[in-house]
């Protein structure tokens, strides 16, 4: 608050603050500061912008460049030392809050065969998208799930969870997504280590998917009072099959191609209260139109290759690459192949935006709906 | 109201009406009748029973006995004359309201190749369960669906709909289920014939199933403001597969075996506001325990053979037979085979009971949970 | 089913059943009857009418004519003998189900000072509207409420309740409204006498109204998991005051004048799942336009005098008179006074219609929106 | 990220990160930084704390000290120059985001008779609590409201609104509360100036309160599709009367005395999606027990005097003083008077916490439930 000038946000427009500093006013401002107060008009135009201007920046992380570092961590630290052996993704505009974009954390975790991390729980909701390897599993509140490539897995707010890789498996990596930064920002983050370090697994393996992962059918008479999905693992094979089926009866979204949301089958809503996830398929040769949305997105390419343009920045991606789209930035996607489809997994904070009544979106009107690419 | 006696419902218990007729009272009652009134205590015990005593009775309709009559209708009437060519099922206790049980109507409809019924809509919600034949289709609000054996299909309240069989098909039969009696009872039934007699089909065939019949995935960004399911056809193959998957991770219900509800994927709730539907699998040799529920049920055996005991009455069934369980009657089910599973489709009015806060259920405590069978 | 003719419902219109009896068909119909079945086209036009045609009829019950009979019951039966000392209202079209209209029961109850009825509970939801006398009270699940003229009181589905009049009070009468007929029709009616005949009253008197009967305020941190209103008594004075306040800022409904619904303050919805209630004020000289709705209504005049026209029948009413409007019948209301307002209390089954997606309404287009009155 | 050491957050506990810096590791960390990445274990214990540790601090702002500055603003700037003439409250821990506590903004606005601010709208939700003066008014989407002392007023997300003071009024001040910081943090803030600078007022004055501010009654047939309350002004007189009524039938909360929430009468929920508000009455001599909650609170003393203890800090307050309680800090309240009640208005972000499943609370177990006061 020891700024030299107080009038740096002036705008020459009726309805906006436009007060030039005078000696008398500066005295007044300093008096207010001494009382933990200030004059709204010195900051009004700053704190009430015309539209969102996210501090996050568009970034792509290429898996083939990160992979070696991720694997090197196997030699550098044990899960016991590290808690979790993860390389996290730091958006240059969000280093202070350890976010990949907005208030979303993401990282790449690696485990070797026979390793098992200790069990914990926290206010942060978590999800995983499996990159490579065999034999990985996650236990969530006693439900053990086996994990395969491109499977999407939940460990919701408040559930005990732990990960491991079976003795007979291979080195496994997966992308983690959590809302840790949001929980901290909201002063709402709690953390507990499981008293036994590992939890019991009283349920049949993969029971959640067998019970709840069926098309438009649910176990009769099951009551579910939790506010997250009873389905904890969404497998890749039926997801990809669903995209193909859907593609045969829809024109798709002009902005997102063949685009489906993962849902909580008990409610039809998002799988968790603070994070949603989607899978989209770009048809051979498809290049979508640009739009922008209130909400932050983290993508991983699950299949194929292509590029996205985010506020004019071209981000090239191929299978396993991760990139982000900050809130209210224009984005469009292009499949690089004329013969193969490309699939993008994404997770986002749209459930927050929708719960709080803040979601909005608009398509780009100019230039045929496509952005000029910055040099 | 010209009853001879007014005290036929007396009960000797504190808290119940117990007033003997006297000459003075009978005079009083007749005075009241002249004013369109009555004394509550003459009917209180009748209208406030200790528990529900449904006028519906347990019945089974054997398809092999009905089938010939159903097919004979092909020769007797055209769809044009009949509107719909249907043999309906008349519960002996509900003949006055044309119900199979409670307020639920059911019938068996038959159409020949090349036939097409005219389009209409009504307040009654309708569903279909396909029995035999190939080439049948239903159009609902412009969505055309091809129908196969054991498929479950909706034509919700207020939707334009029509049925037909393709030229190259075979004679087709299916079971209809509607809440027509309830709509009439509630003085809420409206009916309209489509102005063009046939509706246009602007959407791709079977688009509803391709869009909404996927496991825990929904089309992104689709808004659906109707109060019924956007999924209109639930196919048999994935339903049966779901039962098998679920059976591997659950002990099942003691009363209903492997039991799944068809749901509206947009909400996770029942497919329509007034009728729900379920499919259950009885494992080889399974004989369930008896329970009773507030709600009326119409069953069709979709696979295998067995019997049910309903308030002591044994009802034997095999594939395609239809039977009913009235509200608050004990029922248990037995698979006749020691090696094959048996599947029962059912539809019911539980959504009404749940919406109005009336659902309850209890298991039979006596006799090891099994009913004695009446001779 | 032993009707002579089967073709009495024929209609000469495409899309409607139109099959003349022939000897062969009549044989066919009789074969079907022997199998508890029938041909849909013989009844289709009957069970699928073009619009609702309620069997209920418009009736008015004049309190000054009923009152003497009600009071006479004081001498004829005790509460112990009668359970409840009530004269019920029997719609000539609904005598078989003991309904005042549709599936709604209503009656006038009378109790003398010092009397106390035994406590019971049932699936039926109940409400009361107080007519005359002082000292009446109702206990609901331990909450005791003192009752005054024009107070509206709930005894929801499943709550223990009992009524009485204090020793120092006067003879009291009130109108009861219950959905007993609906509960019986739905095979969902249960009844229990309180094991102690009277319940304890652990809460402060009228605590429900003091806690929940405040404008747009609720007790902080109160969780309420029941599906009916935590507010059990709606007093007359603030209700009438609300009508007057609202009248100063609204043009009112063309069909119902100044019209407010009693709500469950925890949800903003109706006070109970199966019955709602409203109070409306007709301004001096007001004569509303005619409309019709899916739903059945029981009215009591709470203040003033006037008349209603229901499907052409003029029903004159003054304070305390009760009248009914059956589903889908045109109705309009007129205040007889050019200087005083008139108030109509009503209860209805709109919550059922809305839960089940059946509500609709329309205004009368012809004749300036007013019905011709039948001679 | 150019920190000298990476191991400053180590914890010696199984399940927590505990990796000491080595030369090899530091090289690894720097490699990661060059790729916009990092090792989770270097920050895990920081970003996953055991419980929330809010950067906000407890503060009280004494109105008698701020008032002169607020009034001085009348001479220093016009509404035209300033947009709004407001002194905002800057929490020493939240100066960077212009928040009074957490993500909540608050300020004191002043207007002179005859002044009228231009109309605008924004994503931020806003509320007002009136401090002093007569003749103030607010227009919200065409609804004009007259404002009196201790009235609570909404200007929800997206509504056009403007404030003014009538020519015949006096200088008016009120407290503003907005979630501007949250909107900015969520990259969701939009702002628009009304094209005409002033909006039309087509509705009767104070129609919102006359229509929706009645006890457990709502305008019949009103559909309201907005996600905020149709009631925009909650007046002081009925609020205080409600507290007194409620106090006669409740023991009150051990932590908050007689405590009521302002609600959206259409839903029974909070008035806006992102901010709630409450009024509480501390009885003469009442000193509550300490508890803590996930959520941030801004209080204004509406009546009387007393003090609160927040995480050990004693904050003394009297009528019109404003103080804050950060998330998860212990707080207890004491009325200074043995004969008069004291009332605290508060607004908070509990609707956000509840929508996102994050709310929790606990009472202080030690020391008889009272905090030791820091010197």
Image: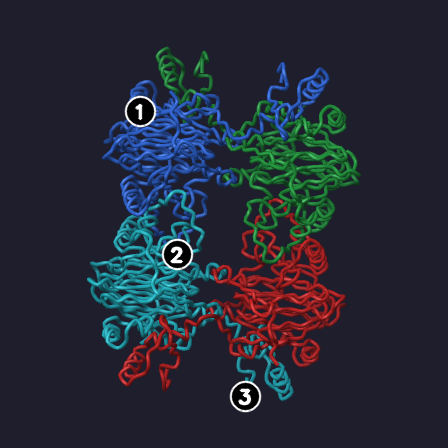
Chain colours: A cyan, B blue, C green, D red
Q: Quadrant of the N terminus of chain D?
A: bottom left
Q: Give how far across and how far down residue B32 sits, in percent.
A: 69, 22
Residue at mark 3 to residue at mark 1: CA–CA distance: 91 Å
Q: How many marks?
A: 3
Closer to viewer: mark 3 or mark 2: 2
Secondary-structure class at tag 2: loop
**D124 in relation to B28, above or below:** below
Nearer to me, A186 or C305 = A186
* Subunit ID for the residue under disc 2: A
Q: Tell me where residue B111 sits by quadrant.
A: top left
- Mark found first going from the N terminus, 3 or 2: 3
Asked if residue B85 lies left or right of residue A184, the reply is left
The image quarter containing residue A323 is: bottom left
State the residue position of label 2. Answer: A271
Question: Going by the image, does D49 lie left or right of C221?
Answer: left
Q: Are marks 3 and 2 in contact (CB under 8 Å)?
A: no
Q: Residues within 10 Å of mark 3 (few under 14, many from 20)?
A: few
* Between A164 and D68, the one nearer to me in the picture: A164
Q: Residues within 10 Å of mark 1 (few under 14, many from 20)?
A: some
Query: Which chain's residue wears label 3?
Result: A
Q: Which residue is mark 3?
A: A4
Can see residue D10? yes
Which element carries disc 1, helix, strand or loop? helix
Residue B218's place in the image compared with D305, above or below, is above
- In percent of width and height, residue D153 lies at 64, 62
**Residue marked by disc 1:** B63
Locate residue D371 relative to residue D134 in the image: left or right.
left
Residue at 28% across, 66% down: A116
**In the image, is residue C277 above or below residue D280?**
above
What residue sits 75% from the left and 70% below the top?
D170
Q: What is the CA distance from the residue labelled 1 to the residue labelled 2? A: 44 Å
Q: Chain of mark 1?
A: B
């Amino acid at each position: 608050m020891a700024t030299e000038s107080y009038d740096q946000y002036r705008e020459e427009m009726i309805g906006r603050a436009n007060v030039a500093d005078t000696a008398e006013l500066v005295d007044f401002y300093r008096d207010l500061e001494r009382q933990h107060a200030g004059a709204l008009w010195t900051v009004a135009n700053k704190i009430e912008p015309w539209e969102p201007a996210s501090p996050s920046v568009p970034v792509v992380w290429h898996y083939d460049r990160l992979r070696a570092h991720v694997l090197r961590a196997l030699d550098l630290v044990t899960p016991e030392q590290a808690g979790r052996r993860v390389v996290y993704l730091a958006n240059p505009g969000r280093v202070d809050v350890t976010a990949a974009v907005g208030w979303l954390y993401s990282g790449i975790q690696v485990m070797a065969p026979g390793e098992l991390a200790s069990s914990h729980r926290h206010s942060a909701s978590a999800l995983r998208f499996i990159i490579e390897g065999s034999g990985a599993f996650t236990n969530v509140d006693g439900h053990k799930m086996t994990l395969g490539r491109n499977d999407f897995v939940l460990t919701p707010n408040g559930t005990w969870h732990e990960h491991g890789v079976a003795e007979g498996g291979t080195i496994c990596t997966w992308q983690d997504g959590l809302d840790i930064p949001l929980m901290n920002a909201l002063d709402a983050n709690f953390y507990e280590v499981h008293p036994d370090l590992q939890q019991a697994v009283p349920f049949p393996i993969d029971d959640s998917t067998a019970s709840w992962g069926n098309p438009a059918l649910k176990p009769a008479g099951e009551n579910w009072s939790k506010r997250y999905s009873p389905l904890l693992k969404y497998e890749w094979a039926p997801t990809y099959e669903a995209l193909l089926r859907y593609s045969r009866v829809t024109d798709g979204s002009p902005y997102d191609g063949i685009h489906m949301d993962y849902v909580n089958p008990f409610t039809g809503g998002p799988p968790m209260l603070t994070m949603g996830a989607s899978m989209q398929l770009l048809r051979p040769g498809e290049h979508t139109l640009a739009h922008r949305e209130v909400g932050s997105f983290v993508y991983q390419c699950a299949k194929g290759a292509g590029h996205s343009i985010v506020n004019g920045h071209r981000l090239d991606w191929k299978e396993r690459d991760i990139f982000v789209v900050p809130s209210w930035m224009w984005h469009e996607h292009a499949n690089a192949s004329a013969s193969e489809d490309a699939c993008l997994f994404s997770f986002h904070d749209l459930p927050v935006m929708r719960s709080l009544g803040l979601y909005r979106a608009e398509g780009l009107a100019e230039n045929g709906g496509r952005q000029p690419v910055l040099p």
